[in-house]
Image (cartoon, helix red, strand yellow):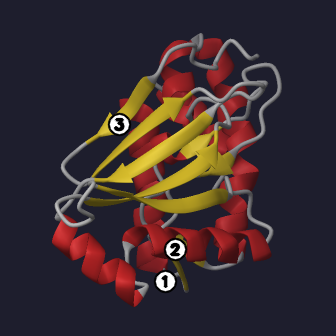
Amino acid sequence: MSDTTPTDRLVFKQDARSRVEWTPMPGTPGLVLKTFLHSPLKQRFTYALGLHPAQAERRTAHWLEQLRIPVVPIQSIGVFRSAEGRATFRVHILTAYQGSSLQHALGKANRNDHPRILAAVAPLVRQLLDRCVFFKDLKASNIVLGLDAPDTLDPKLIDTGSARRGLSPTQRGRMLDMLRQTCLDAGADPASLDHLDLG
């Protein structure tokens, strides 16, 4: 087990719309459970139509896989229901735990390691650009670095529901600015951003 693997149940993120948490699974590095928390009625309606954010995320993850862009695959989608089946309707996504995020790594690593970490992420971002994919949520928190990080880095995308085909110059700039800013917010050495080498 990597030293980046949690040992207890751990909530990575929670807001009004969703909660993302690591959950143990014997014999594996664990699973990541993303539960959508917004209106159960709206979830039920959009899920029935195939328009739920979880379903969109599965479609875009599969599309990115077809483009050979590294992404953490979605293992399954399910629904938490109350005993009556009506009072609670919360859709969830399960993925395999694939290591800590770029955000976490930049905050934890020695600044001397930042150039190496960001240089490892650059090819992943270049693939998005070369394939004209606009991923408006390209943040340091939405890139995981693999189970063997920080020794061996294997960056992959997560939370890809907002990815779309087509990339205008404005969208390109917005996407890269977000990545740079969230890296800085995570504690990246500003000089190390040159190692993203994104133009």
Question: Which badge, 2 or 1, comes first in the chain's sequence?
Answer: 2
* Three-letter code, disc 3: Lys
Q: Are marks 2 and 1 in contact (CB under 8 Å)?
A: yes
The residue sitting at 44% across, 67% down in the picture is 54
How much space separates mark 2 and mark 3, taking CA atoms? Answer: 23 Å
Instruction: Return the x and y of residue 137 as percentages of the image width and height.
Output: 42, 59
Q: Which numbered tag is attached to residue 13?
A: 3
* Three-letter code, disc 1: Ser
Q: Which one is closest to the eye, mark 2 or mark 3?
A: 3
Instruction: Return the x and y of residue 68 as percentages of the image width and height.
Output: 80, 68
Residue 46 position (above or below residue 136): below
Tell me the residue that label 2 is attached to. 134
In terms of secondary structure, where does tag 3 sit?
A: strand
* Three-letter code, disc 2: Phe
In terms of secondary structure, where does tag 1 sit?
A: loop
Seen from the viewer's position, the closer of residues 12 and 33 is 33
The residue sitting at 43% across, 85% down in the picture is 50
Q: Which one is closest to the eye, mark 1 or mark 3?
A: 3
